[in-house]
Amino acid sequence: MTARLLSIGTALPETRMAQSALRDLFAAQPGFDRKSQRLVGAAFDAAAIDTRHVVLPQLAGAAGDGLDVREGDTLLMPPTGARNDEYRRSAPALFAEASRAAISDAGLTPDAITHVVTVSCTGMFAPGPDYRLVRDLDLPTSAERYHLGFIGCAAAIPALRLAARIVTADPDARVLVACAELCSLHWQTSSHPDQIVAASVFADGAAAAVVASGEPSHAGFDLEGFATHITHEGEKDMAWTVGDSGFEMTLTPEVPRIVGREIAGIATDVIGDLDEIDAWAVHPGGRSILDRVENALGLDADALAPSRAVLRAHGNMSSATLLFILRDLLADGARRDGDRVAALAFGPGLTVEAARLTLRRPPT
């Protein structure tokens, strides 16, 4: 029995900011010399992002309770504990909103969920998001729960892989996969190029999916294969560590170059004949990563349009982002039953996660 991704729900914080406003705010920080300001302008303007959602209204200059991150035009640097406290306050509602939508769109009620897989790398607490979903959505207290933490932007694919294996082993299982990331909690007011690049792309958001045995009457994606690879280089170029003032991202200019050098071989090993792929869902770690993938795989200019559209509207929401792209592909009326989809995502290491999916439409 093939595991099928039946539905995808998404959720975003209420505060939406223009990329230009975030650029100007970040460039105005004390201690940024003209060189740093030029680097901020270049990084933010080249990101191919129009707007991003953030969980902190203060970033937009609005009043807000919780984490104190702004004093006038100066961004503050709260300690890690305070940032994590805000994650604990804000993340559960986004997990729940996306999950409710996914369960409803799957035509299910909460009591039908048998397994919960939660994903996040931007905060931690226990009892964690998996426990909160059981309580907040009134899921069965007997639901098996798993949490995948600190895997980074690639984590949605391992979560779907786990869900598919659960369903393959138990055809009666109905697995809720939920990703939520509050990347804005960890922005660093540093003129270091890595931190400027990170601040120019990362955003907040959540997405959830329901995976169950394939049903002819329900649209979705059949989950047909998964693979993971560690590149020959990149361990020091993409990293995510816990610092005293938030989680600290290392994201060097080598990341797109490594992806560009190695993705063709990896994609061929994982996906097979690339000419047989009808649609691509590539995690938009940044515009340059999408450019490198497009060039290395020899894709048409419109092949990564779904990824670029999500990046432009929402930025890089880490693990949740790939599900936004799959949501848009599923909703695209031009996509037909049997279309073959390749998904790729990149995480610390540098790790490449891949999946093969087939779009299914119910008989008319």
Image (spheres, rainbow, N blue to C red):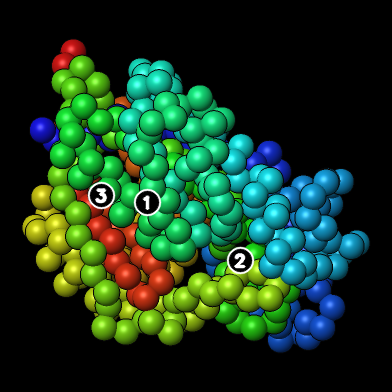
Q: Residue at x 81, y 74 (%)?
A: 29
What residue is disc 3 on? 161
At 36% from the left and 38% from the top, the residue drawn is: 144
Q: Is residue 350 visible?
A: yes
Report how far apart the C-alphas of labels 3 and 1 lie in the structure: 9 Å
Tag 2, which secondary structure?
Answer: helix
Write down the quadrant of residue 345 in the picture. Answer: bottom left
Residues packed near mark 3 inside 10 Å, few (<14), some (14 to 19) or many (20 plus): many
Q: Which residue is mark 1?
A: 156
Q: Is residue 281 visible in this depiction of the protein?
A: no
Q: Is residue 47 placed above or below 278 in the rendered structure?
A: below
Residues at discs 2 and 1 in contact (Cβ within 8 Å)? no
Q: Position of residue 13 (x, y in %)?
A: 64, 42
Q: Check the image and name the residue furthest to the top.
A: 364
Which residue, as the protein is rendered here, is positioned at the far front? Answer: 142
Query: Would you place residue 86 above or below residue 220 in this image?
Result: below
CA gap, disc 2 and disc 1: 22 Å
Amino acid beneath label 1 = Ala
Q: Which mark is residue 200?
A: 2
Image position, residue 227 (x, y; %): 20, 60
Front residue of 175 and 286: 175
Which comes before the other along the chain, label 2 or label 1? 1
Residue 105 vs 164, above or below: the answer is: above
* Mark 1 neighbour density, 10 Å: few (under 14) some (14–19) many (20 or more): many
> Residue at horizontal 41%, vertical 72%?
348
